Amino acid sequence: EPEVTQTPSHQVTQMGQEVILRCVPISNHLYFYWYRQILGQKVEFLVSFYNNEISEKSEIFDDQFSVERPDGSNFTLKIRSTKLEDSAMYFCASSGINRGGSEQFFGPGTRLTVL
Amino acid sequence: KNEVEQSPQNLTAQEGEFITINCSYSVGISALHWLQQHPGGGIVSLFMLSSGKKKHGRLIATINIQEKHSSLHITASHPRDSAVYICAVHRSQGNLIFGKGTKLSVKP
């Protein structure tokens, strides 16, 4: 069964460093998402991506964040200068045809720890 | 005010019990999801609903669009059902808004 994969599963970094979180969405999906979950809190939407551009982003997704689909398979989230408060679980998801009403498939997440 | 409210926040049940988790929302939606988050953190989609009722095994999800309310039922609960159950709504624009989740613990 196709699935969304994410690497690494756990990333530890120093404050101020750049990190890149990687995701491989399901191959025939068209919409891609990043979410984050700070420990003990609810999941929050960061950004959605379609047709090689951002289609929507939340207030959380500021200039420190960027997304890219560098090739036909990977979807990356870059945090330019990490802060302590960026420590969270980051989930990638993908969906098929209809962004507004299509089931989203989640990856297993990357736990980011900023020291 | 949270746009998606779930109740209860925590739920402990004995194996075999019938379980109901509720979700209310205050925004216009195109669909509602029920998700399961395991202790390790992974999220699995259980249902996506835009009307009526869906059933998958021992799980049943219902939605009342007029009342902006959805319920997730688990029949004959089992310890392996222990997880956090999350209600999330697709706003009309498309991104998901998540509830805080209901932590379910089923005791043998």
Image (cartoon, coloured by chain):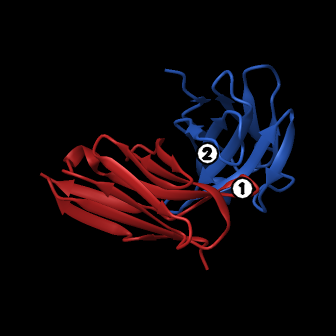
Chain colours: A blue, B red
Q: Nearer the viewer, mark 1 or mark 2?
A: 2
Label 2: state its secondary structure. Answer: strand
Measuring 68% from the left and 31% from the top, which residue is drawn there?
A22
Within 10 Å of disc 2 (Cα), the crowding (few <14, some 14-19, many 20+) is many
Measuring 75% from the left and 49% from the top, which residue is drawn there?
A47
Residue B76 versus residue A18 in the image, above or below: below
- Residue B35 shows which numbered tag? none
Q: Position of residue A89 (x, y in %)?
A: 57, 48
Q: To which chain does the residue with label 2 belong?
A: A
Q: Position of residue B43 (x, y in %)?
A: 48, 43
Q: Amino acid at mark 2?
A: Tyr
Residue where numbered disc 2 is placed = A90
Looking at the image, is mark 1 or mark 2 earlier in the sequence? 1
Closest to the observer: B45 or A92? Answer: B45
Closest to the observer: A70 or B9? Answer: B9
Label 1: state its secondary structure. Answer: loop
Measuring 79% from the left and 40% from the top, which residue is drawn there?
A49
**Left or right of residue B98, residue A32 in this image:** right
